[in-house]
Image (cartoon, rainbow, N blue to C red):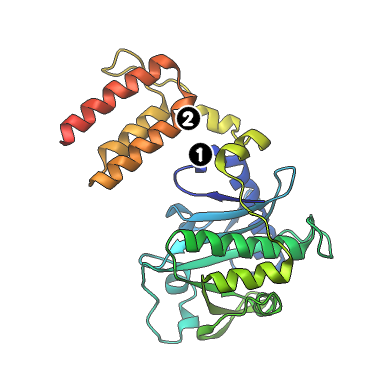
Amino acid sequence: MILVIDALNKHLFTNILEDMYQLRARVFGGRLGWEVNVEDGKEIDDFDHLDPAYVVGLDDDGNVVSCVRALQTTGPHMLSDVFSAILDGEPPIRSASVWESTRFCVDTNRLTRGKDRNSVSYATCELMIGSLEFARQSGIKDIVTVIDPVMDRVLKRSDNAPYGYVGKKVGMGKVPALAALLDCSEDRISRVRDFSGINHDVFIDEEAALSKFGAKTPEVEKVFAPTAANKDDLPRSQLENYLFEQLDEAINESERQAALRLMDALSGTLSSEQKNAMRSSAGRVLAKGA
């Protein structure tokens, strides 16, 4: 099953993100020998601090078996800032409708051979479907992805062949790297579904994931701990402070409404007194911005 983790819900899934970073370390730092930063068994780079979206494959026990990172190309991204040698002098891609997909990997140690639900093949195709459908639903038209020749063959074998390539192939650790282009069309998604026989909805939503895996961890619970009292009658939690920051920093009505929806979505974690205080403070913030 596929879970999408982004800037809005990552505080709820820190345990899954930790598992994902560990998988990346084993694959890119170990198996592929790329020059990546691995600390405490986790592979995390500067681009993970830019609030990317992660499309994460989970098994029935909530273990991370696959993952991929999606990042806008309008700002810093790996092809422009790390793998620029691949471009071979060409300018980097900059488009709101083209996102970069990197760190695509599956756990070959945990998964089996064959095509059942616990196989490498199934997890790979499920992640492809999940990442393409997430991209399409987000208004992304095309994906540029830095891959190795083995992954290039996997894409072609899965009827998900790139429609083009950018720049040239360059050496990167134990294997070369190249940049491929994929459209996020319904036709491409259907081809991968037909190849894999995966015809159901691959996603698990946030609420179901929290219920099924108990994804909130002790580290996350700290977000809800009371902090020092402020001018309100009740002390604010770190979560409340975060929510008010999002509302206060909104620069247009769309962002203000998004902040209010986030407040509403997370209000279930607060007591009735905290909810009332939050609504009162939110009213003051809105009045101030009017």
**Side of 268 where 43 appears, left or right:** right
Which residue is located at x 45 percent, y 43 percent?
8
Give the number of callouts. Answer: 2
In front: 208, or 18? Answer: 208
Residue 11 tag number: 1
Evaluate whether residue 285 shows in this view.
Answer: yes
Q: Quadrant of residue 259?
A: top left
Q: Amino acid at mark 1?
A: His
Q: Amino acid at mark 2?
A: Val
Does residue 40 lie above or below 207 as drawn?
A: below
Give residue 250's position: percent from left, percent from top.
26, 43
Marks 1 and 2 close (CB-CB < 8 Å): yes
Evaluate whether residue 43 shows in this view.
Answer: no
Give residue 107's position: percent from left, percent from top.
73, 58
Residue to which mark 2 is pinned: 223
Q: Secondary structure at mark 2?
A: helix
In front: 46, or 104? Answer: 104
